[in-house]
Image (tube, grey):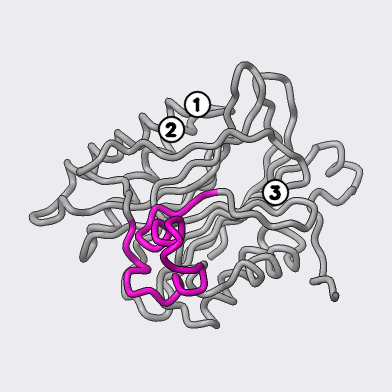
Amino acid sequence: MTEHGERIVTLPDGQHLSLAWAAITDVGKRRELNEDTLVAIPPVFAVADGMGGHSAGEVASAAVAKQLTAATEGAEILTVEGLVEALRLAVADMIDNAGEGELGMGTTVTGVILTSDEGAGRLAVFNIGDSRVYRLLDTELQQITEDHSIVQELIRAGAISPEEAEFHPNSNMITRAVGPSDDPIPDVELLPIETGARWLICSDGLTKELTDHGIWYFLTEGKTPVDAAELLVRAALDNGGRDNVSVVVLDIADPVAVATGQTAVVTGSVPTN
């Protein structure tokens, strides 16, 4: 089932934004339980991918989603401090709800929040783990987050290539997570809010099955966030669906452009060279 919505928001600096989004999570073809949880409620758009044994991952990701959702109530923006506080409350929930032997549970969490910096509206991209945020702008796709994983550390050290990382035996091992063992301080990058951008937030169940070119293709093929999200998930399942697959697609546009029928996000067919 696809969750979707649209909203006009006003930031503290008076900037008006038109948001349109779609969110889908699917158990995939090889897992019995879906341990991914999504948040798609302005000002928070996030994916949490749980881990830690039977049901524990689901508890961890749900705790993060619960506290991030609570942080959105009545809010046009969320501060980075508010984000960290929500993650700390989620860890407290995990500890309270952990069964015997489940204190090793954890979850990735990755996403974007509408925030402000020195009075100006900003988009904060945040990450703990190996779920990812991508930005599509002017037909160019860029991965904004960096994975917290063993293979990413090996790539950074020059020990393996990105191509070798895909088949590395430790490709599923992450180095940071939201859980009882660590203070959940995410990597955060504050970016200007660019209208006409399309954002993708996804679990590694998508990136295991699609290359960056494949992700770019389906993001540009989808006219709306719903179209793009459904194309991405369907392609991941068709390519094997080895893990839970979760995506949030968010378009940020100028409300005037939307009202006058101007294209908010550049989409279309893959160019031929």
**From this viewpoint, which residue is outermost toward the left?**
100
Residue under label 1:
79
Q: Nearer the viewer, residue 1 or 38?
A: 38
Does 20 sit above or below residue 164? above
Which corner quadrant of the image does residue 248 belong to?
bottom right
Number of residues whose C-alpha sits closer than 10 Å to that of mark 3, classed few (under 14), some (14–19) or many (20 or more)? many
| Residue for badge 3 | 251
Name the residue located 45 percent from the left edge and 56 percent from the top edge.
156
Q: Which residue is mark 2?
A: 83
> What amino acid type is highlighted by mark number 1?
Thr
Task: Answer whether residue 2 is magenta in the image.
Answer: no
Give yes or no for contact between labels 2 and 1 (Cβ–Cβ under 8 Å).
Answer: yes
Per the rendered image, the range of residues in magenta is: 145-174
Q: CA distance from mark 3 to mark 1?
A: 21 Å
Residue 224: x %, y % from top left: 73, 59
Spot occupied by residue 227 in the image (x, y as percentages of width and height): 69, 65
* Residue 182, numbered label: none
In this view, the residue farthest toward the top is 118
